[in-house]
Structures are given as structure tokens and as C-alpha cells.
Image (cartoon, rainbow, N blue to C red):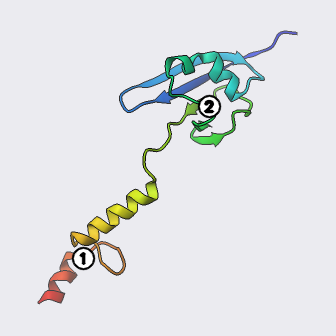
Amino acid sequence: MAVEQIAIELVYGLPTEQTLLVLHVDENSTVEQAIIESGICQKYAEIDLEVNKVGIWNKAVKLTQQLSDGDRIEIYRPLIADPKEVRKRRAEKAKEEGRADKVTGGRVNPQRAKTKSE
């Protein structure tokens, strides 16, 4: 009995370019099998499936996830900065510059600031 083929997409993005591949794989293929079959790991040496997270339509999945017709596999790059730390630094800077309330961290209301100083 012949194995059916399904159509999927595979995406990997860099700051300067994006690669989108349309592939036909066996219906019982996993995410890892599709990535390996695509050859994208040879094109981008920095892709390490033990390090890079993967997802299907912006939802993180395991490499063992079985694919469905129309799935879009996304290979994610590691974060270069912790988002919590970036937000914290931005909030501190806003407080120092007077754009944020030093107590609550919320935006400073320019009208209220004028009435307090008068």
C-alpha cells in the first residue's frame, strides 16, 4: 500500500533573510524527519536541532510531533537577550528620564506634573 504525501512549509528566518520551503513528505513524518529531509541544516550550519526550538504555526512542538497536511514548521533562533531584562532596563531608563512615575512605574501625566509643580 502506498504512503500518502502531505504538503508542508518549513521556515527559518534570519535578520537579513528568510527561507521558506514547500515540501511534500510522507503523511506519517515527524517534524525532525521533515527538517532533515529538507536539507536546511546543511544550508544554515548554525541550526542545531538540540538547541533550536521548533514550532508549528507559532506553537512550540517537540521534534517527534507528527505532521498534518498544511503544517508550517518554524525553526526558531535562540534569543540574544532576556526579554524580562530588556523591559526592566527600559523601565529604569524611563524613570531616570522622568517619563515614568518613580513609584508606580506608569507613564507620567504631563498635566498632573504641571499642577504639582505649581
The one of 42 and 15 positioned closer to us in this rendering: 42
Q: CA distance from mark 1 to mark 2?
A: 48 Å
Residue 92 shows up from this direction = yes
Question: Can residue 56 be seen in this snapshot?
Answer: no
Q: Amino acid at mark 2?
A: Leu
Give the residue at x 56% y 32%. Answer: 74
Left or right, 117 with reference to 13: left
* Image position, residue 7 (x, y; %): 65, 19
**Residue in the picture at 58% in, 16% down:** 39
Q: From this viewpoint, which residue is outermost toward the left?
A: 118
Which quadrant: the C terminus? bottom left
Q: Is residue 20 above or below residue 52?
A: above
Label for residue 5? none
Image-quadrant location for residue 94: bottom left
> What residue appears at the point 62 percent right and 42 percent down from the top-left corner?
60
Name the mark nearer the viewer: 1 or 2.
2
The image quadrant that residue 117 belongs to is bottom left
Q: Which quadrant is the N terminus positioned in?
A: top right
Front-lying residue, 112 or 32: 32
Residue 81 percent across, percent down from the top left: 43, 49
Name the element at disc 2: loop
For the residue pair 110 and 105, the one nearer the viewer reads as 105
Residue at (57, 25) in percent of width and height: 10
Could you say whether the residue bearing mark 1 is in a helix, strand or loop? loop
Ranked by sequence position, the earlier of labels 1 and 2 is: 2
Residue annotated with mark 1: 109
Q: Residues within 10 Å of mark 2 (few under 14, many from 20)?
A: some
Q: Measuring from the top left, give residue 37's x and y in whole percent.
A: 65, 16
